[in-house]
Amino acid sequence: MTDLPIQLDKHRGMIAQQATELRRLRADVEANAKALREREHEMETHLLAAPAQNWAEAAEKAHYLLSLFATTPAAQDPRRQRLIADVLKDFEILSNGSVG
């Protein structure tokens, strides 16, 4: 008898192994998506808690909204993608005084 764990996946067929791997990956993706939704909710709650106190805070709120918009079909036009990128760069320059 050995204390080493038995790798059961090695004793199953390739199709069964692939199916198991897909189930594991799907579970990871679903868990990550749920965690992302929770972090987004937390971020939005924070952003809604009070009005911006300065331009940097206002730019941060706009940055968040533009990032959300950038993932929508309406924002997939190359001109809009460039405009979003330019505005985000402008916010960074105006908030920090330099490009990072």
Image: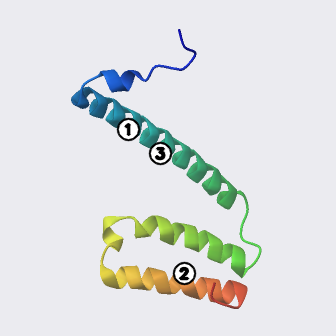
> Which of the two residues, 19 or 71, is positioned nearer the viewer here?
19
Q: Amino acid at mark 2?
A: Leu
Task: Give the residue displayed 39% in from the left and 21% down from the top.
Answer: 8
Up/down of 69 relative to 92, above or below = above
Indicate which disc, 3 or 2, sits on the residue closer to the N terminus.
3
Residue 40 rendering spot, x and y as whole percentages: 57, 53
Whichever of callouts 3 and 1 sits on the residue coming sooner in the sequence is 1
Q: In this orientation, which residue lies closer to the viewer: 79 or 98? A: 98
| Element at label 2 | helix
Quadrant position of residue 44: bottom right
Residue 96 versus residue 68 in the image, above or below: below
Q: Residue at x 54, y 13 (%)?
A: 2
Q: Position of residue 69 (x, y in %)?
A: 43, 68
Q: Residue at x 47, y 82 (%)?
A: 85
* Residue marked by disc 1: 26
**Label 2 Cα neighbours within 10 Å, binned few <14 / some 14-19 / many ≥20:** some
Res. 33 mark:
3
Please name the residue that numbered disc 2 is placed on: 88
Q: Determine the residue located farthest toward the top in the rendered image.
A: 1
In the picture, measured across the screen, residue 22 lies left or right of residue 87, that is left
Q: Which residue type does callout 3 highlight?
A: Ala
Is 89 displayed left or right of 80 in the figure?
Answer: right
